[in-house]
Amino acid sequence: MFKPHDVRPLFPALERLQHGEPVVYLDGPGGTQTPRTVSAAMARVLDRGISNLGGSFATSRDADEITGAARRAIADLINATPAEIAFGQNMTSLTFAVSRALSRTWQPGDEIVVTRLDHDANITPWVMAAEEREVTVRWLDFLPEHGHDLDYAALDGLLTDKTRLVAVTHASNAVGTVVDVPRVVEASHAVGARVFVDAVHYTPHRLVDVEAIDCDFLVASAYKFFGPHTGFLYGRHELLAELEAYKVRPAPAEPPGKWETGTQSFESLAGVSAAVEYLASLGSPSTGEASRRVAIRSGMEAIEIHERRLTDAFLSAALSIGGVTVYGPTMSGANRTPTFAVDVAGLNAAEVQRALGERGIFVWSGHYYAVEVMRRLGVLESGGLVRIGFVHYNTSEELARVVNALDELSQSGT
Ligand SMILES: Cc1ncc(COP(=O)(O)O)c(C=O)c1O
């Protein structure tokens, strides 16, 4: 039996929901848990009643206050200003909205760059927009033999003075690679291209800093960082102001409101603020006047330390199981999230998912919309891989359950 001893117990601050049997929730769409403070904040809004923005009565003032608070929370989370934060249904919808708006400024013969490491939500919206505008799509590959990291050297060859946009992920939701986004941004800005960053997978694992990475746009989804199902868009204020948004006439003409279509989910926005407060609560207790950004930094550092331990423990155990292949960076100390694409010899990914599910371990199999990753790894046609993605609330006992289940399955598969 595998028993990790180097992973300390974690964050009792998260009061975990249990649904009958003890289960292991690993990350993935709808697969993370939310703290009770998040669900309580959302329930409060629904219980009290809420109205739309901009009215001179209590429930509308509440909606204004909740929306403003959520913008301030996300601004603290990613080091931006509240006026640069717009909310939407999810990352995919927001990316389609920006791709439509941005592509109006493109000319036939222009070029864009997308990567094979990205989730399809940061590929197809751009490819469709490019098709409409007769713009050439250039593909940046990743290198399985080099920790599944992007081929940065090839990027320089793809960028030209015609490149208008580079769409890149901050971290891979399939194999866990953390991308050197500042490097991509520097090279892209040098030719005058805008950079759109998908931070959906990165945000629950590491501190986002839009100022440090200097990107033009960034999107993420609160359900991945322990909040509700709502997405947010960051854009440099001047870009959000000058670009023409697809909006109805009575909607605000200025950012961020002009990027928000229809009525927002105010209960979700209350949950977004609570999720950010939760992340801020995970670090060392702040002293004196420390800002929420400082507390978030400390919380994310605690998450990173714990996740690195989980990563090392998982890798050393899983790599020693015969018949189990782990995709993604496998070097000790590699810059990666604790998300692993795994193959068990003799079983297809759906069978492994089912078998783990029967053992109360909830994981995804297939391509999880990272279609190009699976194609590049040569496993798309054969059913993809199983994704085992830990987050900060996973315990050493849970990790041991997962490893032991893989061990058992590898013996049944051979
Ligand atoms: C890396 C990445 N990008 C984008 C998405 C899409 O996010 P949403 O469901 O909010 O549209 C996901 C969802 O799993 C993801 O993991």
Image (tube, rainbow, N blue to C red):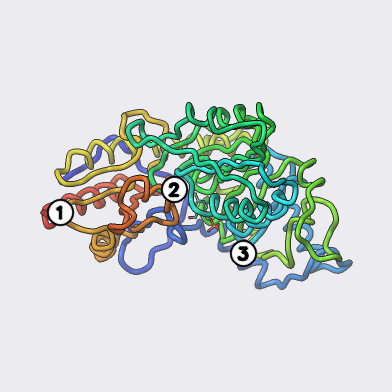
Between disc 1 and disc 3, the foreground one is 1
Q: Earlier in the sequence, mark 1 or mark 3?
A: 3
Question: Percent x, y for residue 183?
Answer: 55, 28
How far from the left and from the top, in percent, is residue 90?
59, 59
Residue type, label 2: Asn
Inspect the image, locate mark 3, and give the three-letter code of the amino acid beneath it.
Met
In the figure, 56 relative to 214: above or below?
A: below
- Cβ of mark 2 under 8 Å from ligand 1: the answer is yes
Q: Nearer the viewer, residue 243 or 235?
A: 243
- Amino acid, disc 1: Glu
Name the spot of residue 100 as percent of width and height, x first.
69, 55
Q: Marks 3/2: CA distance? A: 27 Å
Q: Residue at x 50, y 57 (%)?
A: 34
The label shown at residue 408 is: 1
Label 2 neighbourhood size at 10 Å, few (<14), some (14-19), many (20+)? many
Residue named by callout 3: 42
Residue at x 62%, y 53% (from the top left corner):
95
| Left or right of residue 56: residue 367 | left
Residue closer to the observer: 288 or 342: 342
Q: Residue at x 44, y 48 (%)?
A: 173
* Whole-number angstrom distance, CA of label 1 to CA of label 3: 41 Å
Q: Nearer the viewer, residue 36 or 147?
A: 147
Using the image, tell me which numbered label, if any, was put on residue 173.
2
Q: Secondary structure at mark 3?
A: helix
Give the label on residue 310, or none: none
Q: Earlier in the sequence, mark 2 or mark 1?
A: 2
Image quarter of residue 47: bottom right
